[in-house]
Structures are given as structure tokens and as C-alpha cells.
Image (spheres, rainbow, N blue to C red):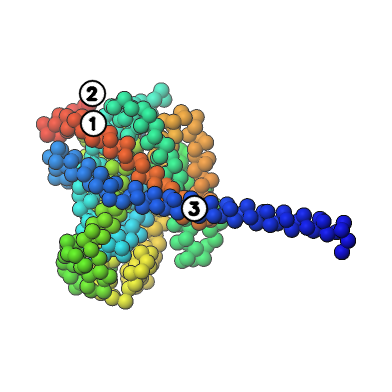
Amino acid sequence: MGQEEFLPLFVKFQLFNFFYYICSLIQEFMEQIELFFSDLSGLIWGWPMIILLIGTHLYLTIILRFPQLKIFKAIKLSFTKDKNAPGDVSQFAALSTALAATIGTGNIVGVSTAVALGGPGAVLWVWITGILGIATKYSEGLLAVKFRQKTSDGTMLGGPMYALEKGMKMKWLAVLFCVFTVIASFGIGNGVQAKAISDSLSQSYGLSPYITGTILVVIVSMVIFFGVKGISKVCESLVPFMAIFYILGCSAILIMNFSYLDDSIVLIFKAAFSPQAAGAGFLGSTIMMAARYGIARGLFSNESGLGSAPIVAAAAQTRNPVRQALVSSTGTFWDTVVICAMTGLVIVSSIIAHPDISQDSAAILTHAAFSKLPYVGTLILNVGILTFAFSTILGWSYYGEKAIEYLGGKKSVFYYRIAWVIVVFIGSIINLTLIWNISDTMNALMAIPNLISLIFLSGVIVKETRKYLWENRLDEEGE
């Protein structure tokens, strides 16, 4: 080989080595970034955040004289139209949109994760978290309507950013909340959910993620480009169907496991307060583990305190803030007190009835429990995952849209929607571990400004509650 032939070959070899070296550096950098956000997410969602959220739940529960006792009045109100009141959509439509975003894969996989890591006692802590979170969701809804504002085209804007700006005069904190909301929306509200749908269809029916992504882009685009009214109309139809369908499936499994229900309930209560409580095929766990994972999954599932649901509550047609606050509070009731509790009972009773069910993986745990229902069990689980994840994409698109509108004005919304459908496709086809950890962190960071507004504006919340609820003036017009 002559020198003329050797030199180009040598250069190509060196270029290949250089390219390989750069790729290795990038891969190592991405691994470090993933590890960083994984650790940061675990830290933020650890005991400090749990204590802050539970503390806020308890504080608001006490100063508001246990608004949980008004839950049946609230449920009745949620089905009552307030047509002549100011707002963009009905109270039920606003609730459905909030539930669409809230009821997600966390209600299925999240609960099974709590059981797998914290034992059966975690189910009780999930339930307790939901009960207490009703007060916080009530308070968020109240502030959202109290401080909402009408735009030049007549639409309503509201949420924690407006409570922080108008109620506390802290616009910089409102901006931070919106930044965290936008980042979280693309991850936990979009890409992660699209991936759940893609994986479910791929595993069950062998459908290509590229086909799934394309279909999702078309369907999501057809909904979100109509704004809140388009989103709310779809959610009004989808949410009741998906919730009832899933609850019926859970009920069928519980009927099958009826002879084990008493043992399941006893074990859940005993394991929640007994050190090293296990038995009946369960791995051992401590009180701290049961509480940590049960509370964390409950908070993550119902989103009480995160500040997401009040963004759509502000669009509701309601004559005063307290009416919508009561309606908003039912979201946590349905999400955690009903759906999460039923999921937990299904998993615990199934493991007692079938001790061979593995607890090594939360996903395996859930699939194994539902597979015990002949013929339709796996179908019910798949439909649940598909509808829950799809509805979350719709609900969170509205949250992020309003946050970006606060930051960049009405013109920025169109570009946000374009980016949204692009991420739907990307999320369907790639691994999202890093995106999950980043958005999980941003999701937690959303809660901090929102909790600050709830605590510092608690006097406003009490004043409005006294005026309209405690003095029986719910039918009066707000100021």
C-alpha cells in the first residue's frame, strides 16, 4: 500500500475514533444527567415534600372545618348546570377535564408500585391521602375562581399563577410556576402517556409504535386545536365511560375474590401500622415504607396541591368561587378514594387468592391481578391504560397551554400546540426514562409555589367559605 493510499485511510480511521469518542462522551453525559434527575426526583419526592403536602392537607382540613363532610353536596353540585354564570364551560366539563388529566396510569401502575414497594398497608395510606387531599383541592379551586380574569375575547384565565400575581403580588413566583408546568406537561402529561399507550398496544397486539404515534397525533390534533371547549367536550364523554368501565372491571374481580375481601381489608389496616407486617404471600415492609410509598403514590395520583387542576377550574361557569371549589374537591374523591382504593383492593385480594403472583414488578403485579378475570381481564386493563393515558394527554395539554399563554401571550399557544403533537409522536417511539425523571422533578417543583399561595391566602379561602358555605349562601352571585 502506497503512502498516497495509506494517509486517507489513516485519516478516516482517526475520524472514526474521534466520532466514537464524542459519542461515548455524549452517552456518558446523558447517563450522568439521567442519574442526576433520578436522584433529584427521589429527593424532592421524599419525606420533605410528603410532609409539606400532608401538612397543608391537614392545615386546610382543620381551618375549613372538614370540607370532606360536604362531599355529597359537592357531587350533587357537579351535575348542576350554572348556565347564566360567567365562565367558558360547565362545572361538570371543567371537572371532567381535570379528572381526565388526573386519572392516569398512576391509578393503575402507581397503586401497584405502592403495594410492591410498601406492602399492602400502602393502600390505606393512599386512601387517607385522598381523604385529606379533598380540602386542598377545594382550596385550589376556590382561589382559581376568586383570582381569575377575563381576556379581551371573553375567555377566562386562572390558576395558581394568577393567585400568586394578584393575591400575593409575587409575579416572579407565578412565572416560575408556569415554567415548571410547561416542562412537566411535555413529559409526564404527554410523552410518558404516549409511551404507555404505545407499549400497551405493542405488547398486546404487536402494533408498531410508529403507527400508534401517527394515529395519536391525528386524534390529539383534532381535539386540542379546538381549545378548552373541544377538550372539555371529549372529556365529558370519555371520563365517565373510562371510569365506569374500569370500576366495573375491578368490581368483577372483587366479586371473584369475595371470600378474601375480609382478609384483605384486615391485612391492609394491620400492615399500615405494624412493623414488618407481611403474610399472605406479601413481602415484608415497615410502617415507614408503607406510609412513604402509599402517601407518595396517593399525592402523585390525585395531584392535590400540585396546582394543575385549578387551571381548568378557573374556566368553569360558576356564580361564586365556593361552588366551583366544592365541585373541584370531588376530583380527588373519585380519583383516590374510589378508583385508587378499588385498584388496591383488587391487587391485595388477588395476591391473597393467588400467592403465586410475583411482586417483583409493579406492572407484572397489575397484569397478573387482572389476568385472573377470565377472557376480559386483560382487555379491561388495556382499555383502562389506553383511555387513562389518552385523557391525561388532553387534560395536560390545556394546563401547559394556559401556562405558556401566561408566559408568552395568546400567540404562543399555536406554537405550543404544534410542539405538543410532535412530542406525542416522539414519546410513542423512544425511551423516556430521562424525560420521566425531569418532568417528575418539575411536577414536584410546581407544587411549591402553589402550596405557598394556599398557605398565605388561607385567610381568603376561609373568608369566602364562611360567606357562601357556612352561611348557606351558595346560590348568591360572587363579587
Say whether residue 192 is visible.
no
In the picture of the structure, the residue carrying the numbered disc 2 is 479
Quarter of the image containing the C terminus? top left
Which label is found at residue 123?
none
Q: Residue at 23% across / 35% down in the picture?
A: 455
Q: Quadrant of the N terminus?
A: bottom right
Check disc 2 and report its element: helix, strand or loop: loop
Sequence-first disc among 2 and 3: 3
The residue that disc 1 covers is 457
- Give the residue at x 23% y 51%: 129
The residue nearer to you, when weighing 303 against 168, is: 168
The residue under label 1 is which amino acid type?
A: Leu
Q: Residue at point 58% right, 53% down?
A: 25
**Mark 2 or 1 closer to N-term?**
1
**301 vs 163: above or below:** below
Name the residue rendered at 37%, 66% in the picture: 361
The spot of residue 53 in percent (x, y) is 25, 45
Q: Residues within 10 Å of mark 1 (few under 14, many from 20)?
A: some
Secondary structure beneath label 3: helix
Residue 245: percent from the left, percent from the top? 32, 58
Total of numbered circles in the picture? 3
Q: Amino acid at mark 2?
A: Glu
- Res 76 quadrant in image: top left
From mark 1 to mark 3, how far is it between C-alphas?
40 Å
Left-right relation of 151 to 304: right
